Amino acid sequence: MKPLLLLAVILCSAGAFGQASALSNQVTPIQIVDHPLHASLTPMACERPLVGGAPDTYSYAQGERPLWEFGPVSEPVSLGDVARAYRKEKVSAKKAELVLEKQGS
Protein backbone atom coordinates (compact mmCIF):
# COMPACT_ATOMS: atom_id res chain seq x y z
CA MET A 1 0.00 0.00 0.00
CA LYS A 2 2.84 2.39 0.84
CA PRO A 3 4.62 1.97 -2.52
CA LEU A 4 1.35 2.63 -4.36
CA LEU A 5 0.80 5.81 -2.33
CA LEU A 6 4.39 6.95 -2.98
CA LEU A 7 3.94 6.35 -6.73
CA ALA A 8 0.67 8.37 -6.76
CA VAL A 9 2.36 11.29 -4.92
CA ILE A 10 5.27 11.29 -7.40
CA LEU A 11 2.95 11.22 -10.42
CA CYS A 12 0.75 14.01 -9.05
CA SER A 13 3.73 16.22 -8.23
CA ALA A 14 5.19 15.67 -11.71
CA GLY A 15 1.86 16.62 -13.27
CA ALA A 16 1.57 19.75 -11.12
CA PHE A 17 5.12 20.78 -12.03
CA GLY A 18 4.36 20.28 -15.73
CA GLN A 19 1.27 22.49 -15.50
CA ALA A 20 3.04 25.24 -13.59
CA SER A 21 5.92 25.58 -16.05
CA ALA A 22 3.86 25.43 -19.28
CA LEU A 23 2.65 29.05 -19.31
CA SER A 24 4.58 32.20 -18.63
CA ASN A 25 3.21 35.26 -16.86
CA GLN A 26 4.53 37.67 -19.50
CA VAL A 27 1.95 39.53 -21.56
CA THR A 28 2.42 39.15 -25.31
CA PRO A 29 0.55 41.42 -27.72
CA ILE A 30 -1.43 39.90 -30.58
CA GLN A 31 0.45 40.02 -33.86
CA ILE A 32 -1.79 40.12 -36.92
CA VAL A 33 -0.08 38.85 -40.05
CA ASP A 34 -0.21 41.35 -42.91
CA HIS A 35 -1.16 40.04 -46.35
CA PRO A 36 -0.55 42.54 -49.16
CA LEU A 37 -3.06 41.01 -51.62
CA HIS A 38 -5.89 40.75 -49.11
CA ALA A 39 -8.16 43.52 -50.42
CA SER A 40 -6.82 44.42 -53.83
CA LEU A 41 -9.05 45.01 -56.86
CA THR A 42 -9.12 42.22 -59.44
CA PRO A 43 -11.27 41.68 -62.54
CA MET A 44 -14.31 39.41 -62.24
CA ALA A 45 -13.82 35.74 -63.02
CA CYS A 46 -15.31 33.99 -66.04
CA GLU A 47 -18.75 32.44 -65.79
CA ARG A 48 -18.77 28.72 -64.96
CA PRO A 49 -21.77 26.37 -64.80
CA LEU A 50 -22.65 25.06 -61.35
CA VAL A 51 -24.31 21.83 -62.49
CA GLY A 52 -22.40 19.54 -64.83
CA GLY A 53 -19.36 20.36 -66.91
CA ALA A 54 -20.88 21.94 -70.01
CA PRO A 55 -23.36 24.83 -70.19
CA ASP A 56 -25.90 22.67 -72.04
CA THR A 57 -26.24 20.03 -69.26
CA TYR A 58 -28.60 22.23 -67.23
CA SER A 59 -31.99 23.17 -68.63
CA TYR A 60 -34.36 25.85 -67.41
CA ALA A 61 -37.95 26.48 -68.46
CA GLN A 62 -40.79 28.66 -67.35
CA GLY A 63 -44.48 27.90 -67.34
CA GLU A 64 -47.18 26.11 -65.43
CA ARG A 65 -47.32 22.36 -64.91
CA PRO A 66 -50.61 20.59 -64.32
CA LEU A 67 -51.26 19.48 -60.77
CA TRP A 68 -51.66 15.81 -61.75
CA GLU A 69 -47.94 15.67 -62.65
CA PHE A 70 -46.97 16.12 -59.00
CA GLY A 71 -48.57 12.88 -57.80
CA PRO A 72 -51.71 11.96 -55.90
CA VAL A 73 -53.11 14.37 -53.37
CA SER A 74 -53.44 12.69 -49.98
CA GLU A 75 -56.40 13.58 -47.83
CA PRO A 76 -55.44 14.12 -44.19
CA VAL A 77 -57.20 11.80 -41.75
CA SER A 78 -58.68 13.50 -38.71
CA LEU A 79 -57.47 12.55 -35.25
CA GLY A 80 -60.96 11.40 -34.25
CA ASP A 81 -61.10 8.91 -37.15
CA VAL A 82 -57.69 7.55 -36.16
CA ALA A 83 -58.85 7.12 -32.55
CA ARG A 84 -62.09 5.35 -33.64
CA ALA A 85 -60.16 2.97 -35.90
CA TYR A 86 -57.71 2.20 -33.08
CA ARG A 87 -60.58 1.52 -30.68
CA LYS A 88 -62.28 -0.85 -33.18
CA GLU A 89 -58.99 -2.66 -33.72
CA LYS A 90 -58.47 -3.02 -29.97
CA VAL A 91 -61.97 -4.46 -29.45
CA SER A 92 -61.68 -6.93 -32.32
CA ALA A 93 -58.19 -8.10 -31.32
CA LYS A 94 -57.76 -11.73 -30.30
CA LYS A 95 -58.09 -12.16 -26.54
CA ALA A 96 -56.27 -14.69 -24.38
CA GLU A 97 -58.35 -17.75 -23.58
CA LEU A 98 -56.55 -18.65 -20.36
CA VAL A 99 -55.53 -16.08 -17.77
CA LEU A 100 -53.04 -17.14 -15.10
CA GLU A 101 -52.99 -15.19 -11.87
CA LYS A 102 -50.27 -15.52 -9.31
CA GLN A 103 -51.71 -16.38 -5.87
CA GLY A 104 -49.64 -15.31 -2.89
CA SER A 105 -45.86 -15.28 -2.97
Image (cartoon, rainbow, N blue to C red):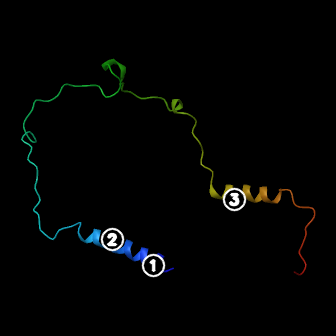
Check whether the beta carbons of the residues at disc 2 and disc 3 lie within 8 A of each other.
no
Q: Residue at x 89, y 73 (%)?
A: 101
Residue at mark 2: 14
Above or below, 60 against 33 in this view is above
User: As displayed, is residue 78 above or below residue 10?
Assistant: above
Name the residue furthest front: 3
Give 18 or 103, whichever is nearer the viewer: 18
How many numbered discs, if any? 3
Question: Which image quarter: residue 8?
Answer: bottom left
- Which of 89 and 10 lies nearest the eye of the viewer? 10
x and y percent of residue 7 in the render? 43, 74
What residue is pinned by disc 3? Answer: 83
Residue 36: horizontal and vertical position, in percent? 6, 41
Q: SS at mark 2?
A: helix
**Quadrant in which the C terminus is drawn:** bottom right
| In the image: residue 78, left or right of residue 92 | left
